[in-house]
């Protein structure tokens, strides 16, 4: 086994893929997580659309909280294996897809991230356009 460590593939073993030994979140980590989860253009568009449909503020709040809870539960279920073992997602994906096959869920995650970034950018640009047209209707 000793000689085997000399010939390890650097793509399979590195510090980023090692199990987490200790979790030490500070206030900044929680605030950052909250900001990235709650404050998004998609959330603002959803809330604005619900208000535009004529729903009262209480119903909009309940709908948003219900959606957030559903997503949080699903995300926590997906994260359970990593949380209990300390191993990051790429290592857990290897258990299901194999060492080389784990590239597939990684690519899917990347495509979804690029798509969501594009959607957020498009929504944000439309929000700016609506704001400008609301303030200065002659621009349209």
Image (cartoon, helix red, strand yellow):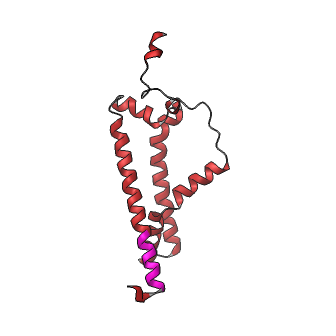
Q: Residue furthest bottom?
A: 138
Q: Position of residue 119 (x, y in %)?
A: 38, 62
Question: Vertical placement of 103 versus 140: above or below?
Answer: above
The residue at the point 40 percent across, 51 percent down is 113
| Residue sitting at x 35%, y 49% | 111
Camera-nearest residue between 113 and 76: 113
Q: Nearer the viewer, residue 105 or 43?
A: 105
Outermost residue toward the top in this view: 2
Q: Position of residue 112 (x, y in %)?
A: 37, 51
Residue 69 point in image, percent of width and height:
50, 55
Query: Is 134 covered by the magenta stretch?
Result: yes
Residue, x 49% and y 57% (percent of image)? Answer: 68
Question: Does residue 111 appear anywhere in the picture?
Answer: yes
Write down the quadrant of residue 126 in the picture: bottom left
How many callouts does the rendering have? 0
Q: Residue at x 35, y 40 (%)?
A: 105
In the displayed structure image, the side of residue 31 where residue 42 appears, left or right: left
Q: Position of residue 96 (x, y in %)?
A: 36, 31
Is residue 54 visible in this depiction of the protein? no
In front of the other: 115 or 54: 115
- Quadrant hosting residue 138: bottom left
Q: Quarter holding the C terminus?
A: bottom left
Magenta span of residues: 125-135
């Amino acid at each position: 086994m000793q000689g085997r460590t000399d010939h390890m593939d650097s793509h399979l073993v590195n510090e980023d893929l090692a199990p987490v030994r200790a979790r030490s979140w500070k206030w900044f980590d929680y605030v950052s997580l909250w900001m990235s989860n709650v404050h998004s253009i998609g959330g603002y568009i959803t809330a604005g659309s619900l208000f535009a449909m004529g729903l009262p503020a209480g119903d909009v709040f309940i709908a948003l909280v219900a959606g957030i809870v559903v997503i949080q539960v699903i995300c926590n279920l997906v994260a359970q294996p990593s949380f209990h073992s300390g191993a990051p997602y790429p290592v857990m994906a290897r258990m299901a897809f194999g060492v080389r096959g784990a590239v597939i869920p990684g690519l899917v995650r990347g495509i979804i991230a690029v798509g969501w970034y594009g959607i957020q950018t498009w929504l944000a640009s439309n929000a700016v356009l609506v704001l400008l047209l609301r303030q200065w209707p002659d621009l349209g």
